Image (tube, grey):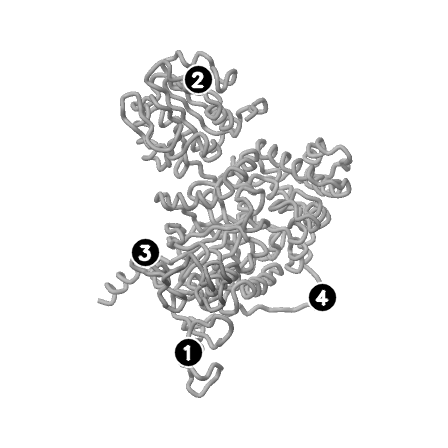
Amino acid sequence: MAQVVDKIVNSTVGDAKKRQMDGFTLEQNDKTPLTSYFGTKIAETDIALRAGARGPTVLEDFHNREKISHFDHERIPERVVHARGAGAFGEFKLHTPLTGLTTAKILTDTSKTTPAYVRFSTVGGSRGSADSVRDPRGFAARFYTDEGNWDLVGNNIPVFFIQDAIKFPDLIHAVKPEPHNEIPQAQTAHDNAWDFMGLHPQATHMQQWVMSDRAIPRSYRHMQGFGVHTFRLLDAEGKSTFVKYHWTPHLGTHSLVWDEALKLAGQDPDFHRRDLWDAIEAGAYPKWELGVQLVKEEDEHKFDFDLLDSTKIIPEDLVPVKNIGTLTLNRNPVDYFAEVEQVAFCTQHIVPGMDFTSDPLLAGRNFSYQDTQISRLGINFGDIPVNRPVCPFMTNQRDGQNTMFSKTNRTAYHPNRFDALPTTEPAKGGFRSYHETVSGIKDRLHGPKFNEFVSQAQLFYNSMSEPEKKNIISAYQFELSKCYETQVQQTALNRINLIDHDLALAVAESLKDVTVPDAVPNHGKKSAFLSQITGKTQTFTAEGRKVGLYLLPGYSYAQVEPIKIALAAAGVMVKFVGPATGMVEAGNGQTQNAEFTLENSRSTYFDALIFIGGDSDDYTKKMKNGRLIHAAREAYMHLKAIAATGNAVGWLTDLALPGDLPADAKAKEEITQANGVLLAPSVGTGAQFSQQFLDSVAKHRVWDREVEHIAA
């Protein structure tokens, strides 16, 4: 009987956080009358109480005072970093236990489903900045475990700019907008940022990642996550194993192209937030695998880098990533402020069976996160519903702003005569710290391996494919062209030259007043795992992609239906674009609802485009539309998969993309594929067309397409 009860309880435990949050969710409808904060029903909320129709407003109007006073205090201090973010709830399911390495139940018990929450964010910008800027992304995951909250607070990049938290204020002061004019917002393309990165050797490796496409992810759903630091796992005897955490998206790790990112910042500043929300609402739940790199305690010093150095990775070529569980996000917040803005992560939130290492950056974060949450939310931020654990919790803390609980315990100290709130020994689940031998001279020192800054930056650049290297060069050129002091440009170029001489020469082509130093050796080593295009563990799938189908009145319904069905069956989100929102009538009288228009959307919203032909010969006359032509050219320039069916093929080859596609394709019976464009004038709606198109979408970009001549 007990086993049956346990099974029933566990079947709903993944929903435990939602059930807890439901208790703090207020339903507002026509049955819930407007009242004051303390329950008095309000008869008038549009006009303040006045002494005469044109007289002064009187102070006794308690509703007016309460309403305005609350409004005056609605905003809390935004996060100094990671201010711009989005979050969602979900669940974590362990499938491969780390038995014998840790006592943490979340990493050993495969029968449990753990409620989870993730907040994604940019780092440098304010709350009002755009989603698609070049910046690291925060990937902060919370697990509401049976043993307490575990917060794995990381980024989408596995390393960081600095090795020691004492440098964090310097870093953020440097990358934030210039203080004299508060420009530029959410960018490192300015003198102060590159002054710091050029003069601070620790930033050399991170600089490569940020200049790569990793800093402009396609979406949160297509983004890796990393714990960044090396942590510890502890077994029942207290023996330690080093661990690094990785999040790998089921949809693959993919990015925007730079021109696309720039346009999205203006077209849809909420692009990533909207994408996450829409995917969850559509049931296309984002998923990640939690992976671990495990290093035995006795192997700590076998590498040519220090495990405690957060500017270094453990290359997967040396230590493979072992996937152990699946994170699924399946529920959007009910209230953004209450559940996203007020969520308060702290790196020191771990559970028994885990511990920290002596990573000096992690040590500072363990202080800083708690401190900043107190500044933003008050000392009792843990009582806010989104921050509460789902397991029983009780402390001897008391009082402070926004105290939420009345406690019956009169002895808020330990020990006490009632033995209230007794401690728990480690054998019964109490937290135990790792018993580490500590020795050495007290001084401001790092370990000797901390002093090498170039090797892994070279490894990263050497491992990139040619298109990725080209994008890195363009990123450096853009960023440094926004620096107006030659000294800053030169310092940055000197640092780049230490990574790769050819890279420095290429970047310098756009900087007229700098001198490239003499070449220095590049070790030539590569990793098989770092490239987003050729990486060994990269995933290429059409699942979860958004495809725009462009329709005009008189389109061929027979061409649309088979495509829509095939794409939906592959997990693709099909979005229709028409001349106006609402129903677009086909040539046979059937209709299809257009969610987007040529004015309210751009090709940048979609991963791939299909232009549908019409039933009549004069259909292509309607397609002589500037917005439609621009959509085709822009998507082509952004290296996206494109297709055309029926007589839209001739429009695409002759008008939209003349010279880039074979002109005779419109006269052929068979499907033509050229430069990543699928042309099907007569058989374009069959299974062969859909499969070829899906294969092209899965590749993410047509990397070998020449587009320098395209202006869109």
Residues at marks 2 and 4 touching, judged by CB atoms closer than 8 Å: no
Nearer the camera: disc 3 or disc 4: 3
Image coordinates for residue 710, horizontal then vertical, percent: 56, 23
| Residue named by callout 3 | 29
Nearer the camera: disc 1 or disc 4: 1
Amino acid beneath label 3? Asn
Amino acid beneath label 4? Asp
Instruction: Give the alpha-carbon distance from disc 1 to disc 3, as whole Å.
Output: 34 Å
| Residue named by callout 1 | 407
Image coordinates for residue 219, horizontal then vertical, percent: 48, 42
Numbered mark located on residue 500 in the image? none
Work out whether 560 lies above or below 101.
above
Work out whether 308 lies above or below 501.
below
Nearer the camera: disc 1 or disc 3: 3
Quadrant (top left/top right/bottom left/bottom right) for the C terminus: top right
Q: Earlier in the sequence, mark 1 or mark 4?
A: 1
